[in-house]
Each structure stands twice: as C-alpha cells, then as structure tokens.
Image: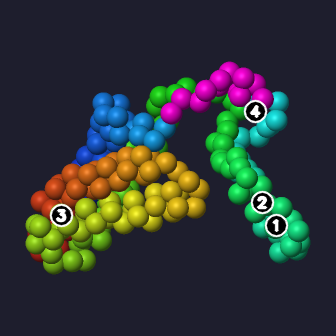
C-alpha cells in the first residue's frame, strides 16, 4: 500500500512539474492561442455588455423544448453567416499566478496520480504494461476532452495538438514512476 500511495503521489508531482515545464518553458501552453487585436477597445465593450463572469456563446441557441422552427432556422442562419464563438469572461481581475492556482493544480495532479495508481493496483501488468496503461490514460483524457472541443466548438487544431503533448507526454512520464512504484499488488506494502 505504501508503494501504491508513494507511486501515485510521485506521479502527481511529475504531472505538476511537466505542466509547469509545458506552460512556462516550452511553447506548448500557448499553442493555438493568439493576442486579441484591439483588446483595450474590446475589453471596454465587454465591460459595458457583460456584468457576470461566465462562458458566453454566440450566436446563442435557446435549447428550450418550445423553440420554434423559425427560431431554430434563425439561429442556424446566424451560425452559418458568422461570427460564431465563445468568450470566457471575468469582469474582475485577479492575480495571474496566485498561490491558489498552483495549489489547486497540484492537488488535482496528486489526485489524478493516485487514481491511476489505484487502477493499476487491480492489474497484473508488467513494467511495460503499466507504462502503456498510464500513457493510455493521457491519450484517453485528450481524446475525450480536447477532440470534442475542436469538433464542436472550433478550438484551433494547434491548441488541441498542444493539449495532446501536455496530456500524453505528461502521463507517459507519470507512467514511468507508476511502472516502478505503483500498481503492483504483489509488491504493495
């Protein structure tokens, strides 16, 4: 059990460090993103139009069951003609690299590492099998989150590719730790 917990925690630490490397030292964290032209003017307009923080989608489709055929046709036409997009909006600023953000990310990575270590404990996989299992967790995470963002919401392909690098390489590296320390029920304890 000690090896399982240690392996899961160290895998979480590896994920956290990899996340820092990809976002602070490599261009991976910025892939598919670009500067918003005229951001001062656009920020001013957003401040006038929006009061609450949230994820705003346009054009908006009211998914109410009573939506008329005309309303649906109008939405489809607006979507076809563009523009279409999403705005993640926070009217109040905050510290960009606050300790809270790092604590939440670290706790998330630790929890993820421990979860995969627990899953591995139910297997009898070899070192290579445990490494492949953990790496597949990264592939699974990417396929089930990033591909739908690209498909349904038009996230840039570069953004999705960056997410692939972040998730798959991160779980490969965490998998190296887990292949050694986590998931072998015969050696736990």
- Residue 42 included in the magenta stretch of the image: yes
Residue 117, by quadrant, is: bottom left
Residue range of the region highlighted in magenta in the rendering: 34-45
Q: Say which quadrant the N terminus sits in.
A: bottom left
Whether residue 170 appears in this view of the structure is yes
In 3D space, how far apart are the residues under numbered discs 2 and 1 (Cα atoms)?
Answer: 6 Å
The vertical placement of 138 against 125, above or below, is above
- Place of residue 10 in the rendered image (x, y in percent of width and height, measured from the top left): 24, 50
Q: Considering depth in this image, is 32 or 93 the residue closer to the camera?
A: 32
Separation of disc 3 and disc 4 at Cα?
Answer: 47 Å
Residue 10 is covered by the magenta coloring: no
SS of the residue under disc 2: helix
Question: Which residue has dot 2 on it?
Answer: 77
Q: Disc 4 on helix, strand or loop?
A: helix
The residue identified by callout 3 is: 131
Query: In this rendering, which labeled residue sits more in front, label 1 or label 4?
Result: 1
From the image, state whether disc 3 or disc 1 is nearer to you. 1
Of the residues under marks 3 and 1, which one precedes in the sequence?
A: 1
Q: Identify residue for label 1.
A: 73
**Tag 4 or tag 2, which sits nearer the N-term?**
4
The reply to whether discs 3 and 1 touch (Cβ–Cβ < 8 Å) is no
User: With 43 as the anchor, is 30 left or right in this view?
Assistant: left
Disc 2 versus disc 4: nearer the observer: 2
Q: What residue is drawn where x is 66% and y is 43%?
A: 87
Q: Are marks 2 and 3 in contact (CB under 8 Å)?
A: no
Q: Is residue 51 above or below residue 123?
A: above
Neighbor class of circle 2 (other Cα within 10 Å; few <14, some 14-19, many 20+) is few
What residue did someone put label 4 on?
46
Numbered circle sitting on residue 31: none
Which percent across, then down, holds residue 91?
Answer: 71, 32
| Mark in the foreground, 3 or 4 | 4
């Amino acid at each position: 059990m000690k090896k399982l917990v240690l392996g899961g925690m160290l895998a979480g630490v590896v994920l956290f460090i990899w996340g820092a490397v990809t976002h602070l030292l490599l261009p991976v964290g910025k892939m598919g993103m670009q500067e918003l032209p005229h951001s001062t003017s656009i920020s001013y307009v957003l401040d006038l139009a929006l009061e609450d923080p949230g994820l705003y989608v346009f054009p908006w489709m009211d998914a109410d069951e009573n939506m008329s055929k005309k309303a649906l046709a109008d939405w489809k036409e607006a979507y076809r003609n563009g523009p279409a997009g999403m705005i993640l909006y926070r009217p109040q600023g905050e510290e960009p690299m606050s300790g809270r953000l790092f604590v939440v990310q670290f706790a998330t990575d630790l929890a993820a590492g421990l979860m995969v270590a627990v899953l591995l404990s139910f297997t009898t996989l070899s070192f290579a099998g445990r490494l492949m299992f953990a790496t597949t967790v990264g592939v699974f995470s990417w396929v089930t989150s990033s591909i739908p963002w690209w498909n349904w919401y038009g996230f840039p392909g570069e953004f999705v590719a960056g997410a692939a690098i972040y998730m798959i390489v991160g779980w490969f590296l965490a998998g190296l730790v887990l292949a050694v320390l986590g998931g072998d029920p015969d050696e736990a304890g």
